[in-house]
C-alpha cells in the first residue's frame, strides 16, 4: 500500500500565519511587494489584490452587446508545476473580428496563469508558460492526458478550442492540431474529462452552445440583444483518447445525438455506481441531458426518465452548471443544477431516478430572485455535510447581484447564510465562473470568482479549519493518473461521507484536483475506502486528521 503524507496542519499553518498577520512581505508580481491582510472576523475575506491576483475579465469591448459576451469566463485550480500548491488559470474574452464592433485595441486582453508561491501570494507566469491566447475563451479544464504526472490544459473558446500539453518545466505546448480536438467554429462553453471506457486514459466531452450570427438583430428588443433561441444549436462532441497524444471523435459511434441542446454546463460522474462514468449536460432553454454510460460501449440519454431533464414545473430552464455530491449521507450522488430562477437540487433515489428537492430544501425560494451561474458543493465550515456556493449576475446587462452560500442544515434543508459570512456577500457583482480549493493548504476551502468584464475576486476562508479535515490526492496507476472516476468513502465520528473524484465543477470552471473532506471534531479517520476506475479496491484505516495524503492505486 502506497501512501504519502504531503502536508500537515502544523506545517502549513505557519505559512498561512506568515501571510495573515506577521507583517512579512512577499513578491507577488514582478518585484511588486504585497502584504496579505490579517484575518478579520469574516468567514470569507476578499484578498485578490494583496495576493497578486490582478486578473480582470474582458468581454472585448466596453458595452455588453451580444449573448457570447454575456457568457463570461471561468477559472481552474490546478497544480501545474506539482509543487504541492494549487495554481489558478483564468479565462477572458478578447477582441475578435466580426464579434466585436469596436476597433482593435493596441493591447489585447487574454487568459492568465498565476503560480502559487506557497506563501499566500501568486505570480503571473502567463508569458513564460505560453498560455495567454489570443483566444476568446469561455472556460478551461485541466487533465493529465498522457499520464506523465503533469496536468494539461483544455481551453474552450468561441472558435477553435486549444489543448496545451504541460512540458513539466513550467511551459506548455499547443498540441491541438495533432490531438484533433479543435472542433470547428463552434462556441464551446465547457468540457469535462472522464475515462468513459476505463482504459486508463482520460477522454473529453465538449459542450457546444449555439451558432452565433453577429449581424442578426431583433427589430424590437426590450431585453437587449437576442437570446439563445434566436440561434441554431450546436452539437456536442465526445473525443476518445487514443493514448498516443491523439483523440478520435466518437460522438456518433457512442450514440450521442444532440439535436437541439445549447450546452452551458457539463459534468461527469458515475451517478448509479455501476463503475462507468456518466455525463450530464445543463442546456440553455432546452431540456438537459443525462448521458448514461452503457459499459463503455454507448451512451443513452436518460434525462427525462431519470427526472433530471426539466424543472419541478416540467419546464426547460436556463441551466448553467452542474455539480455532484452526497448531501444527505445516503451513499448516493445527488446533483445541484443552477439556473436563472429556482435552481434544482436533484436527490438521487437510486435505481436511476432523481427527485427535485429545490422547494423542500428551501433553496428555490432563496435562489429565485437571482440569476445563478457557477455552483459547487462545498463543505466551507468542515462540519462534514456539503453546502452550496453560487455566483449570481444579470443575464443581458452588467447588473450586479450578491453571490450566495447555502448552508446544509443536516435535515434535508439548506439556509442562505451569505450575509452572515462577511462583507463580500453584501457586494453586487456580475458573477460568472468560480473555482474552489484550498490554496494555502490550511485545511479549508477558498474561492476564486470571475466577474463579467470586471476584476476577479479571491475569497480566503478564515475559519473553516476550526474544524478538522483531511485532503486526498489520488494517483492512479492502472487507472488514469488523475484518478477521475474513483469512488471514495471516508468514515469518521460515526458518519460516512461518499464522494467521487470529478473533473469539471461549476460554470466553465474546475475545482481543486484534490478531494476535501470536513471532519468536524473527529480526531481520527476510521476508514477510507476507494474503488478505482480499474475496479481495484483499497482500504486505509486509523488515519490522523488535518493532513494531505497522496494515495497511490495499488
Image (cartoon, rainbow, N blue to C red):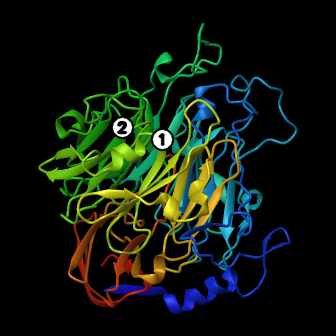
Q: Position of residue 286 (x, y in %)?
A: 36, 27
- Residue at screen point 43% across, 34% down: 263
Q: How many marks?
A: 2
Q: Quadrant of residue 86?
A: bottom right
State which quarter of the image contains the C terminus.
bottom left
How packed mark 2 is, by other alpha carbons closer than 10 Å (few <14, some 14-19, many 20 or more), is some
- 277 or 528: nearer the eye? 528
* Residue at the extreme top of the image, as rendered: 219
Marks 2/1: CA–CA distance: 38 Å
Which numbered disc covers residue 250?
2
Indicate left or right for 320 with 543 as reference. right
State which quarter of the image contains the N terminus.
bottom left
- 317 or 134: nearer the eye? 317
Relative to 323, is 157 above or below? Answer: above
- Residue at screen point 40% across, 55% down: 202
- Residue at screen point 35% across, 80% down: 520
How packed mark 1 is, by other alpha carbons closer than 10 Å (few <14, some 14-19, many 20 or more), is many
* Residue at the extreme left of the image, as rendered: 351
Q: Please give the residue where the numbered disc 1 appears in the rendered image.
A: 370
SS for dot 1: loop
Indicate left or right for 388 with 125 as reference. left
SS for dot 2: loop
Amino acid at each position: 500500500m502506497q501512501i504519502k503524507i504531503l502536508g500537515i496542519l502544523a506545517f502549513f499553518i505557519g505559512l498561512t500565519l506568515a501571510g495573515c498577520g506577521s507583517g512579512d512581505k512577499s513578491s507577488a508580481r514582478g518585484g511588486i511587494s504585497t502584504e496579505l491582510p490579517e484575518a478579520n472576523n469574516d468567514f470569507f475575506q476578499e484578498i485578490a489584490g494583496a495576493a497578486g491576483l490582478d486578473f480582470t475579465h474582458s468581454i472585448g469591448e466596453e458595452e455588453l452587446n451580444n449573448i457570447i459576451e454575456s457568457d463570461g469566463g471561468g477559472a481552474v485550480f490546478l497544480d501545474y508545476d506539482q509543487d504541492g500548491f494549487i495554481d489558478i488559470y483564468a479565462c477572458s474574452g478578447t477582441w475578435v473580428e466580426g464579434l466585436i464592433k469596436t476597433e482593435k485595441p493596441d493591447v489585447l486582453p487574454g487568459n492568465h496563469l498565476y503560480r502559487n508561491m506557497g506563501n499566500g501570494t501568486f505570480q503571473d507566469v502567463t508569458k513564460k508558460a505560453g498560455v495567454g491566447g489570443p483566444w476568446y475563451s469561455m472556460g478551461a479544464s485541466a487533465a493529465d492526458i498522457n499520464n506523465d504526472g503533469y496536468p494539461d490544459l483544455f481551453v474552450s473558446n468561441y472558435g477553435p478550442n486549444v489543448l496545451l500539453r504541460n512540458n513539466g518545466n513550467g511551459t506548455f505546448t499547443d498540441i491541438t492540431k495533432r490531438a484533433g480536438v479543435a472542433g470547428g467554429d463552434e462556441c464551446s462553453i465547457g468540457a469535462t474529462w472522464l475515462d468513459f471506457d476505463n482504459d486508463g486514459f482520460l477522454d473529453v466531452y465538449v459542450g457546444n452552445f449555439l451558432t452565433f450570427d453577429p449581424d442578426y438583430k431583433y427589430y424590437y428588443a426590450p431585453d437587449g440583444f437576442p437570446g439563445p433561441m434566436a440561434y441554431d444549436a450546436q452539437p456536442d462532441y465526445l473525443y476518445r483518447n487514443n493514448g498516443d497524444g491523439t483523440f478520435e471523435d466518437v460522438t456518433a459511434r457512442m450514440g450521442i445525438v444532440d439535436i437541439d441542446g445549447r450546452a452551458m454546463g457539463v459534468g461527469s460522474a458515475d451517478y448509479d455506481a455501476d463503475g462507468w462514468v456518466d455525463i450530464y449536460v445543463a442546456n440553455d432553454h432546452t431540456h438537459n441531458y443525462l448521458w448514461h454510460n452503457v459499459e463503455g460501449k454507448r451512451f443513452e440519454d436518460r434525462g427525462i426518465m431519470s427526472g433530471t431533464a426539466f424543472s419541478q414545473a416540467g419546464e426547460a430552464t436556463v441551466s448553467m452548471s452542474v455539480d455532484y455530491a452526497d448531501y444527505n449521507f445516503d451513499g448516493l450522488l445527488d446533483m445541484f443544477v443552477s439556473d436563472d430562477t429556482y435552481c434544482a437540487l436533484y436527490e438521487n433515489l437510486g435505481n436511476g431516478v432523481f427527485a427535485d428537492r429545490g422547494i423542500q430544501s428551501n433553496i428555490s425560494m432563496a435562489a429565485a430572485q437571482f440569476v445563478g451561474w457557477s455552483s459547487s458543493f462545498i463543505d466551507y465550515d468542515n462540519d462534514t455535510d456539503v453546502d452550496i456556493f453560487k455566483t449570481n449576475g444579470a443575464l443581458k446587462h452588467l447588473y450586479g447581484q450578491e453571490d450566495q452560500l447555502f448552508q446544509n442544515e443536516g435535515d434535508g434543508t439548506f439556509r442562505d447564510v451569505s450575509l452572515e459570512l462577511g462583507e463580500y456577500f453584501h457586494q453586487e457583482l456580475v458573477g460568472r465562473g468560480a473555482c474552489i480549493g484550498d490554496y494555502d493548504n490550511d485545511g479549508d476551502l477558498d474561492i476564486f470568482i470571475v466577474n463579467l468584464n470586471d476584476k476577479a475576486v479571491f475569497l480566503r476562508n478564515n475559519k473553516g479549519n476550526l474544524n478538522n479535515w483531511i485532503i486526498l490526492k489520488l494517483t492512479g496507476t492502472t487507472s488514469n493518473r488523475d484518478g477521475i472516476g474513483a469512488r471514495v468513502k471516508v468514515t469518521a465520528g460515526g458518519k460516512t461521507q461518499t464522494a467521487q473524484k470529478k473533473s469539471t465543477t461549476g460554470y466553465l470552471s474546475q475545482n481543486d484536483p484534490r478531494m476535501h473532506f470536513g471532519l468536524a471534531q473527529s480526531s481520527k479517520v476510521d476508514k477510507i475506502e476507494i474503488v478505482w476506475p480499474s475496479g481495484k479496491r483499497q482500504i486505509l484505516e486509523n488515519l490522523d486528521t488535518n493532513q494531505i495524503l497522496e494515495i497511490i492505486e495499488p
